[in-house]
Amino acid sequence: MANTLKVWMAPNTVTPDPKDKIFILETTGKADINKIYEEMRAEDTGLRPETIVHVVTLFERVCARLLMNGWQLNTGLFYAVPRLLGLAEDGRWNPEKNSIYVAFTQNKVIREESAKTSIAILGEKADVMYIIGTEDRKTGLKDGTMTSGRNFFVRGANLKVVGTNEAIGVTLTGEDKAVIKLDADQITTNNPSELILLLPSDLKNGKYELTVTTQYSGRTLLKEPRSASVEVHVGESGGEGGGDRPEIE
């Protein structure tokens, strides 16, 4: 089955040349593990739903166990290898300062699927708001990793946090749906193309959705706020967010 990615053209905020454009993905939505189960059943494999769930869960558990025992994992879909963060202070592993993360790289299955994917250009958006990348300023990681109490860099377009609407600001929404809103002084750099955030020091390990909400639109303020979001994480739970996969308003 052929694939299609829908994209917009938008100004490249990284370069000063106004003629420079980049492609921004028009996201179809967010798919979780249940969506994968649904698509697998649609393939008419003849397997019972509980069998599919069992096999996928077993696959995930075995992959995680191999990685956490030092294996470099090649599944065909991705290549993964465990990495270690932090200094070896006093010759000891300190869970407060050291952590483990897994680096993922696309592999043969993704490359083959990419080769049969067409691109549908929807047009040009001059005033689009998007997040195109993040960086943990402590570790230098650009995979969506955050470090509690440290600076976090967000890059994109029309991100400057301004406006009078009460929704304006930067929020972190956890897996439990609890929302943490950063104080204004925690946005230490507030530019249209980049934000530097001072993260709360008490962030728990886990996945978060980082959302920037603003009325910024060049010289004038929008009547209604708009938002851009990206998935990020603290600790060992991620590796999915912060890449060059911007979400647009």
Image (cartoon, rainbow, N blue to C red):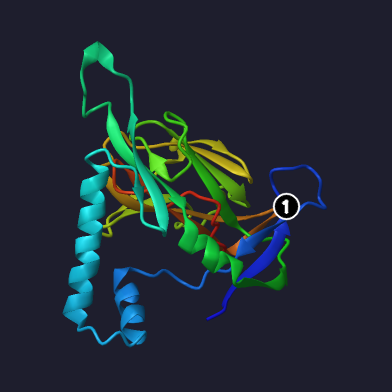
Q: Secondary structure at mark 1?
A: loop
Location of residue 122 by image quarter: bottom right
Foreground of the two, 137 or 210: 137
Position of 26 relative to 21 (above/below): below
Residue drawn 34% across and 29% down? 85
Residue 56 in the image: above or below residue 21: below
Is 43 on the left or on the right of 96, as rendered?
A: right
Image x and y of residue 189, in percent: 55, 35
Residue 224 found in image quarter: bottom right
Residue 62 sits in quarter: bottom left
Callout 1 amino acid: Arg
Q: Tell me the quadrant of the picture where the C terminus can be found.
A: bottom right
**Relative side of 249 to 8, left or right:** left
Return the residue nearer the eye: 62 or 150: 62
Residue in the image at 57% along x and 62% along y = 248
- Residue 41 in the image, given as x and y percentages of width and height: 31, 83
What residue is rendered at 54% in x and 61% in y? 111
The residue lying toward the viewer, choosing from 229 and 183, is 229
Please provide percent x and percent y for residue 128.
65, 61
Q: Give the residue drawn at x 69%, y 43%.
A: 14
**Which residue is denoted by mark 1 in the rendering?**
219
